[in-house]
Image (cartoon, rainbow, N blue to C red):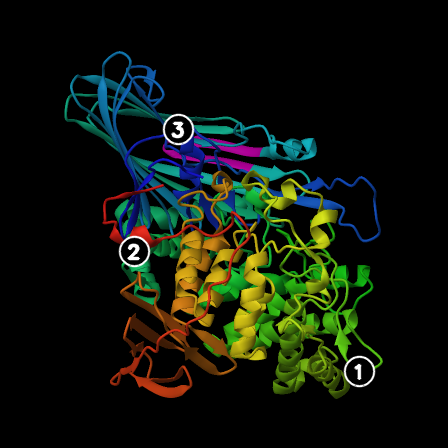
Amino acid sequence: MITHPAYLVEPWCLRETELNLEVLPQSESVFALANGHIGWRGNLDEGEPHGLPGSYLNGVHELRPLPYAEAGYGYPESGQTVIDVTNGKVIRLLVDDEPFDLRYGRLVHHERLLDFRAGVLRRTAEWTSPSGRTVRVRSTRLISFTQRAVAAICYEVEAVDDETRIVLQSELVANEQLPKAVGDPRVAAVLESPLVPEEHGADGGALRLMHRTVRSGLRVATAAVHAVDGPDETRTYAQSSENLARFTVTSTLRPGERLRLEKTVAYGWSGVRSLPAMHDQVDAALAGATSTGWQGLCDEQRAYLDDFWDRADVEVDGDAEIQQAVRFALFHVLQAGARAESRAIAAKGLTGPGYDGHSFWDTETFVLPVLTGTVPHAAAQPLRWRHATLPAALNRARTLGLEGAAFPWRSINGDECSAYWPAGTAAFHVNADIADAVVRYLAATGDETFEREVGLELLVHTARLWRSLGHHDHQGQFHIDGVTGPDEYSAIADDNVYTNLMAQQNLRAAADVAERHPDLAAVLEVDDEETAAWRDAAERMTLPYNASLGVHEQSADFTSHQQWDFAGTRPDQYPLMLHFPYFDIYRKQVIKQADLVLAMYLRGDAFTDEQKARNFAYYDPLTVRDSSLSSCVQAVMAAEVGHLRLAYDYLGEAAMMDLSDLESNTRDGVHIASLAGTWIALVAGFGGMRHCDDTVSFAPKLPEQLGRLAFTVQVLRCRLRVEITTENVTYSLAEGDALEVDHYAERLTVTRKHAVVRKVPAAPGRPEPGQPAGRRPAHRGWVATRVEGDRMG
């Protein structure tokens, strides 16, 4: 956790006003730029010092053998690891032959600013070299949302007090040295020099490097062009080798004179395209970007984000940290998915190598709802990726002796690559999470083309898995046994309520879509008998319930297990999985992350209000939040059942996950799902938004610390604005003709001309549940008094 001041609290940017090498890796993650296709960590322009250099292309990975102490049937044979591709960020500066290295000389001033509205990373520095020459450096970096393959940098150096010789070295660097990988040496072998050179070139201001990977067979092309503005005596030359292409600029600056370098970089990759084709692809991308120009790229970026914020902004009055954090979150979620275009969204996005660059069920359950509500076209793309990986999922199901598709728990290319089967293979709920994302996307957009091309096939094949995996008992009840739900501390359980409820929805949705499109269903050999079997399994789905306690079982007999010794667990023994054997964890009542509580959020229609309150009161004291996915869900349900103070604290934990490095792993990349959870906690928690079938409903309520919450969501080609105060809520349309919404139980019709205002009822008064010893979220009462310009840490 960051325990000293790090970033200023401002509404539309993240600003760092001093360079602290202790948190440099974390800053590289939070200052990362991406567009869903390209990702650049927020490394310093000069390349060093750095915590972890990183340049990523969505989907570019290398294969590696998976470690097993004992082999077993059906175990995945190959793992996948995201690799650091050619680095186009580097612009080295030499001042009278001395490298501009902030570890030496005297750093007079250093500031970095991530601008959420302009979509750029700005940096200013003033530095005096060991020999006494002072220069000012200004740089602006962007990765284009409008030109997917393009990134660009404007780098400017100014002499301050003496005539100074300046050398700039703008580079493309492949196979750059990385920190030593800890753990499996085979992973280190994959990460060390993963790119095999194929072609290099330097011509005038143009640079090019072409590489391929050995095992995964992917070709990566990188090219750059430069524009220079400086004194008349400025000279340039270029050179290249297998892993380095360099454009060098030399000049002598008098005090007040500036040397400006504009660098445009293009990336491309493919597993099938030839070397000449990739060569032409990046050249074409550069031609388009050069035609647009640096200022044109900046203007396009700003226009794109103006439109995004008009559709997606969340306004929070009363907590400056949360206001900044939710915009930071939305910006990073957009960066993860805006131009993913039939690729996955990884758990860390394109901000770092955490979790090996894998995509999990987090994407469908946490990230896609945010994209669906703000930029729906971006939400469709990861689902199109899932659809493209159906052949692998069908093969995986057959390997496991099942029908339908078994989607991977973690993957980059669609193949399962989890070596730990109780949390991987057994976590079949990923199938239902994908189906849920399909259902929610269709409900929010009415996209019939997507339904016919993608949705139907995904729903049918996921439904077939449930019918194959589950069984009817002698009384006709349907059971799904031996699975792992979201709570990975309760593996291989029978009738996990979350899994069963999400499977139930999946089965019903598949039957509905097959009946809407009988022609396409016939191609998949879906008949009336199969849809009837799906509906019967859904109708008879088992939901374990403990009548004596008056709560649902997280899974069969869960409440009969011994409770974990929370009082005897030290704070430094969390997360439990790193300090206790799984055998001990699995047989106790202890919950890693929201499971049944997540079911109550996503399938709230399956529970009464009283059941939700009693379930939350039982399960919240057992949940240790050893996953960043949990706090936002607990915030949502705490708000729904009336614990607004607690919901506000859980919101704070989700929102500050990376800005305060709460899990001490932000250095490996930001937590995209937890960032998405900030929006979920505000919109679904305090806004009370639910979208079930064709009904969009709201049950707004605010904690006393917040004076106002306003947000905009996209629903069926309408842009709905919701503004909540402690007393009233106003529903208005910024786009679209009319939209029906429910305010609590009242049906309202909102039009462009007719906003609707309703009272916000008081939250029910209930005793607040306890939390595991030492695991209560931090109180946020003091934050409301902080003002813009304060620091966070």
Question: What mark, if any, has residue 21 been given in the picture?
Answer: 3
Q: Is residue 522 above or below residue 76?
A: below
Can you give x and y, in whole percent of width and height, for residue 5 in the image? 33, 37
Is residue 39 depicted above or below 736 in this figure? above
Q: Which secondary structure dominates the residues rendered in magenta?
A: strand
Cα separation, mark 2 vs mark 3, equals: 29 Å
Q: Is residue 402 above or below residue 776?
A: below
- Between the C-alphas of marks 1 and 3, the distance is 63 Å
Q: Position of residue 133 (x, y in %)?
A: 23, 16
Asked whether the beta carbons under mark 2 and mark 3 sit within 8 Å of each other, the answer is no
Mark closer to the chain start, 1 or 2: 2
- The three-letter amino acid code for the residue at tag 3 is Leu
Percent x, y of residue 618: 58, 65
The magenta span reads 198-210
Between discs 1 and 3, the one toward the N terminus = 3
* Quarter occupied by residue 755: bottom left
Q: Nearer the viewer, residue 710 or 463?
A: 710
Of badges 1 and 3, nearer the viewer stands 1
